[in-house]
Image (cartoon, coloured by chain):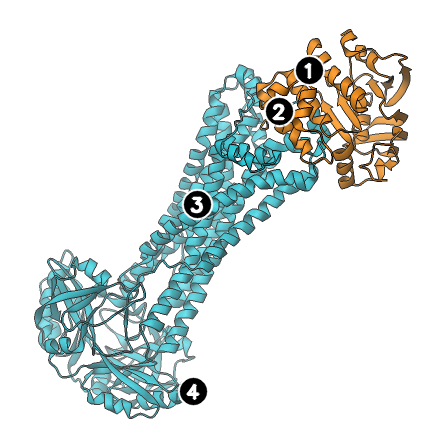
């Protein structure tokens, strides 16, 4: 009994293959984005956790100017500390042959053969450095690859003011440098910033720090209170120029990775649901229509003795079969895209292994969600099929009731043609279905718009950060803050046009129970090169007293303008002062505070207001200036605005444009699915009328107008709806993707509106024309012989 | 001469050796097996015969809805079997009014709008209101088909067919779904179109009584015209015995 119904099911699927496929594609998109983001998210989390665990990534970190190695024992004795380890971390300037830009490395001291207890090195090739072998280093894998370096190669470096020749004995990685960025830079650049490891004794000798350390890493005992340990550690480290201990959440590498994971998580929450909603709609519409056309058959089957449940299940199976196709295709696509995306992560992050695997749970979860949404869409139709009594089902359905609408009464005066009336009344006759087409196409537009606007968001960031906020050509960072003499020294370099000082002082800001580690950036009130630009584009000047906080920071602290925050200096004089918040500023990058140079000087009182120097230079003299700066031991690094900008643009083009490419395809898939199903249903409902028009002497193109006109009207209605939804989705995603590190602005350009609309219009037009071709195959004779 | 120009015709249709073969899978159905005919302008012709004898096939070919497999069919001096799809559409638009058993009105349009569907695309139509008045529906012009009786719907279909002042009205069982009183009213409007507008009327029916209102009756059998009866006098629809 069930078997013949199953044969009908297969034939129905084949007969409606176009519509079924269109729905499957939307479900596949939901499944693919779900598997992609969940799969990559879980793979990254598992990889990170395994890496941290296996290579003993520390939990609390502290840096200081210089402390005796014996401090480690005292730290280890602190309550809650499981293990502690001290090391020297030293920046160095590298001189790679043929390279005329500032290349830097951070050198970490390690035990003999590279052994450490915490933040262990993964030796990929070669060996660890000897504890006292001068010049032996392990170089991180990404830096080596980016610069074509290999075992046995030698590099000239300036370490702590003196020239050294380094020899690569190993290629490695470590869990505290999964993501690494040079000081003063915005983006990681593995060709210009490397992570090196050198034997402890060798680095002590090179930096004149016998039996001394500059940084501490700790692990905690189970159940230890991290905040308490940090507080005690700060007390211990303070006399040695400590800059404030912090946990993993403030660790640069870890927090950047967390940020990425949060974005992936956000993607899972926003994008697959959009596709699922559309698939629910489509199943609702298609199954509803199918059951209406099969009304007589349903009656007949019931008259033969098929139970209502068997018939309901038959139609539900139709929806589930379509969903299963989508699930299978989407799983494969999602798995493949996830694997490609994981590879991309492998390029940006320094992982020793990156195991991409999607667990069965993810597939099952996605499949369950897909089936649930399709079933939800099927409920209406299935219920209608179940409730239909055989006697009612076998008599023809009552004719549809049409009415002259209010709008049409007005339109009639404006000269509606009869065909115009047909279109308007059909839309009004099926308001639910029309609304679904409008909302479905709208969602596809919204999704496209909200992803394309990321390009604008990145451009706005680029514009704000590199064009409005920064006007210097070079930023010269010093090993430690200098007095103003250094400015005159820099001005004397040929080709330097102007020099300004700026300084970033590490502080802990507290308000009530909340506190945040950050920096206060200071400059003179009349400095012009580095400006603070509000998200509105306006510049905010430095007040003669008090602080400016980035709005994000003010929100985290819960402080308002006019209130005072506690400022605890984390370097030099460890004092705490109350300072008034005199303004907040909406910035896209970072969470910082700003103060006028004099205001900060009165706090720090070290007579060294120059943390870094901003230079405007004659472009023709650029190479000369870079070379001059490289020779100065006080210089830690030089950042070029133009290079940073190029890197940022490259990142935008590689990643965001690839992502946008995917979403163009996905959004177009929705538009195609919605329009195709809408048009096919429209065509099947109107085949009789369209044939009548042909008989009456209407040309094919005129008849197609009836079909296309209705779709065009619905798509036109979908455009404002879609842009509205796109605005909402875009703002939601911008908010979800924003973090302490940066905030994505929602600033779509007109081109984005235009582009999104064009893509959807093109997809809709293409699909509608595909269906309109059926007008050519209308059999006038057959249709007119039959009662409608 | 263009297909639009139909006023000066003396012969409406002529056909020579008209054949139509339908291919359905592996079997061939010979719907017409060599039909010769001549129909004069302004004539009333009834096609009689059992189901499957070829009446509807002929009507469809004459109306430009279908093409003959072989043979020639002329409308005046326009050879229909050489026209492409767009030319056939133009031919229908200009010259032919169709009336079917099941009305084929557009349910979303009122009676007036159903007629306007045709007047919107015609060269020299009468007003939709005038056409509806001719069939006695002046009072019900703004009703939707679902609000009209079967006979009223068929009269709207007649009004729609005559509104463009066609040279020919082709009617396939126009009274097939109607009771006798309603059927007579529909036939009266058709007769009026013939007598007042000079429209050629070709009418398929199973009802032999209706044959009495024709000038000539073509009796179909097995895809051929088996015989032609000529009525010396035509009776009025009201005199028809059902």
- The alpha-carbon separation of the residues under discs 3 and 2 comes to 36 Å
Q: Secondary structure at mark 3?
A: helix
Residue B11 or A152: which is nearer the viewer?
A: B11
Q: Secondary structure at mark 2?
A: helix
Q: Which chain is cyan?
A: A
- The alpha-carbon separation of the residues under discs 4 and 2 comes to 87 Å
Q: Is residue A446 left or right of residue B138?
A: left
Pointer 4 chain: A
Residue picked out by circle 1: B177
Residue picked out by circle 2: B111
Residue picked out by circle 3: A721
Give the mark nearer the N terminus: 3 vs 4: 4
Q: Quadrant of residue A21?
A: top right
Q: Is residue A551 above or below residue A520?
A: above
Q: Which chain is orange?
A: B
**Dot 3 crowding, Cα within 10 Å, few <14, some 14–19, many 20+:** many
- The alpha-carbon separation of the residues under discs 3 and 4 comes to 56 Å
Q: Is residue A162 visible?
A: no
**Pointers 1 and 4 within a single chain:** no
**Pointers 3 and 2 within a single chain:** no
**Pointers 1 and 2 within a single chain:** yes
**Dot 4 crowding, Cα within 10 Å, few <14, some 14–19, many 20+:** few
Residue A11 or A686: which is nearer the viewer?
A: A686
**Pointers 4 and 2 within a single chain:** no
Residue picked out by circle 4: A98
Circles 4 and 2: CB atoms closer than 8 Å: no
User: Residue A540 appears at what percent x and percent y?
Assistant: 25, 69
User: Residue A259 appears at what percent x and percent y?
Assistant: 30, 60
């Amino acid at each position: 009994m069930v078997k013949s119904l199953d044969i009908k099911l297969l034939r129905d699927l084949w007969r409606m293959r176009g519509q079924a496929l269109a729905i499957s594609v939307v479900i596949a998109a939901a499944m693919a984005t779900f598997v992609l983001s969940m799969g990559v998210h879980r793979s990254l989390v598992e990889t990170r956790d395994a890496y941290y665990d296996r290579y003993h990534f520390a939990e609390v970190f502290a840096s200081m100017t210089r402390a005796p190695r014996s401090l480690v024992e005292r730290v280890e004795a602190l309550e809650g500390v499981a293990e502690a380890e001290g090391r020297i971390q030293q920046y160095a300037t590298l001189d790679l042959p043929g390279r005329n830009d500032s290349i830097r490395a951070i050198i970490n001291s390690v035990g003999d053969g590279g052994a450490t207890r915490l933040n262990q090195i993964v030796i990929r090739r070669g060996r660890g450095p000897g504890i006292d072998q001068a010049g032996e280093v392990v170089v991180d894998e990404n830096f080596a690859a980016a610069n074509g370096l290999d075992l046995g190669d030698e590099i000239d470096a300036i370490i702590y003011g003196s020239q050294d020749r380094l020899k690569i004995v190993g290629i490695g990685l470590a869990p505290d440098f999964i993501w690494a960025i040079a000081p003063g830079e915005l983006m990681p650049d593995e060709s210009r910033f490397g992570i090196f490891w050198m034997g402890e004794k060798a680095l002590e000798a090179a930096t004149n720090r016998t039996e001394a350390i500059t940084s501490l890493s700790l692990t905690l005992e189970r159940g230890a209170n991290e905040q308490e340990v940090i507080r005690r550690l700060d007390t211990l480290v303070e006399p040695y120029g400590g800059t404030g201990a912090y946990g993993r959440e403030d660790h640069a590498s870890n927090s950047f990775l967390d940020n990425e994971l949060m974005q992936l998580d956000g993607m899972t929450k926003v994008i697959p649901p959009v596709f699922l909603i559309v698939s629910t709609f489509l199943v609702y519409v298609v199954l509803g229509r199918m059951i209406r056309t099969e009304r007589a058959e349903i009656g007949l089957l019931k008259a033969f003795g098929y139970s209502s449940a068997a018939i309901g299940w038959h139609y539900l199976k139709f929806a589930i079969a379509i969903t299963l196709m989508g699930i299978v295709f989407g799983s494969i696509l999602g798995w493949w895209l996830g694997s490609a995306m994981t590879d991309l992560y492998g390029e940006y992050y320094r992982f020793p292994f990156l195991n991409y695997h999607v667990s069965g749970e993810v597939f099952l979860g996605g499949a369950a969600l897909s089936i649930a949404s399709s079933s939800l869409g099927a409920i209406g139709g299935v219920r209608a099929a179940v409730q239909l009594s055989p006697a009612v089902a076998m008599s023809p359905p009552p004719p549809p009731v049409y009415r002259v609408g209010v709008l049409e009464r007005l339109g009639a005066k404006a000269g509606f043609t009869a065909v115009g009336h047909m279109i308007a009344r059909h839309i009004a006759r099926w308001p639910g279905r029309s609304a679904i087409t409008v909302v479905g196409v709208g969602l596809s537009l919204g999704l496209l718009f909200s992803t394309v606007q990321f390009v604008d968001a990145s451009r706005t960031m680029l514009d704000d950060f590199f064009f409005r906020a920064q006007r210097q050509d070079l930023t010269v960072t010093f090993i430690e803050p200098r007095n103003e003499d250094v400015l005159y020294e820099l001005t004397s370099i040929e080709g330097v046009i102007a020099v300004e000082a700026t300084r970033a002082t590490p502080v802990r800001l507290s308000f009530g129970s909340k506190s945040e580690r950050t920096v206060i950036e200071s400059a003179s009130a009349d400095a012009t090169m580095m400006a603070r630009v509000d998200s509105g584009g306006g510049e905010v000047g430095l007040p003669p007293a008090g602080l400016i906080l980035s709005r994000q920071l003010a929100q985290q602290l819960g402080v308002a303008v006019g209130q005072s925050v506690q400022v605890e200096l984390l370097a030099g004089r460890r004092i705490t002062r109350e300072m008034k918040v005199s303004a907040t500023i909406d910035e896209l990058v970072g969470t910082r505070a700003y103060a006028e140079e004099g205001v900060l000087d009165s706090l720090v009182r070290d007579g060294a207001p120059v943390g870094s120097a901003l230079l405007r230079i004659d472009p023709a003299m650029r190479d000369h200036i870079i070379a001059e700066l490289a020779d100065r031991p006080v210089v830690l690094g030089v950042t070029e605005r133009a290079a940073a900008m190029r890197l940022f643009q490259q990142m935008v083009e590689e990643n965001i444009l690839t992502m946008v490419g995917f979403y163009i395809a996905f959004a177009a898939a929705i538009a195609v699915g919605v329009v195709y199903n809408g048009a096919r249903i429209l065509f099947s409902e109107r085949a009789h009328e369209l044939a009548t028009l042909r008989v009456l002497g209407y040309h094919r193109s005129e008849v197609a107008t009836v079909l296309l006109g209705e779709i065009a009207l619905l798509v036109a209605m979908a455009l404002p709806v879609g842009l509205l939804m796109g605005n909402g989705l875009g703002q939601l995603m911008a908010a979800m993707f924003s973090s302490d590190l940066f905030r994505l602005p929602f600033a779509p350009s007109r081109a984005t509106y235009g582009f999104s609309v064009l893509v959807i219009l093109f997809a809709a037009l293409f699909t509608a024309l595909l269906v309109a071709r059926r007008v050519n195959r209308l059999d006038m004779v057959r249709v007119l012989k039959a009662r409608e | 001469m263009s297909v639009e120009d139909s006023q000066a015709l003396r012969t409406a249709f002529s056909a020579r050796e008209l054949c139509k073969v339908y291919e359905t899978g592996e079997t061939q159905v010979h719907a017409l097996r060599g039909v010769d005919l001549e129909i004069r302008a302004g004539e009333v012709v009834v096609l009689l015969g059992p189901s499957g004898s070829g009446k509807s096939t002929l009507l469809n070919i004459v109306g430009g809805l279908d093409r003959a497999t072989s043979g020639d069919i002329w409308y005046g001096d326009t050879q229909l079997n050489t026209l492409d799809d767009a030319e056939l559409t133009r031919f229908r638009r200009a010259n032919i009014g169709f009336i079917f058993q099941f009305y084929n009105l557009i349910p979303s349009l009122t009676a007036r709008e159903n007629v306007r569907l045709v007047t919107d695309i015609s060269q020299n139509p009468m007003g939709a209101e005038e056409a509806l008045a001719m069939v006695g529906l002046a009072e019900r012009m703004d009703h939707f088909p679902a609000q009209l009786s079967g006979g009223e719907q068929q009269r709207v279909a007649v009004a729609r067919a005559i509104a463009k002042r066609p040279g020919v009205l082709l009617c396939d069982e126009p009274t097939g779904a109607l009771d006798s009183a309603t059927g007579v009213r529909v036939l009266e409007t058709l007769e009026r179109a013939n007598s007042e507008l000079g429209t050629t009327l070709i009418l398929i029916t199973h009802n032999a009584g209706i044959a009495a209102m024709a000038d000539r009756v073509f009796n179909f059998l097995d895809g051929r015209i088996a015989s032609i009866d000529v009525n010396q006098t035509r009776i009025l629809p009201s005199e028809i015995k059902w």
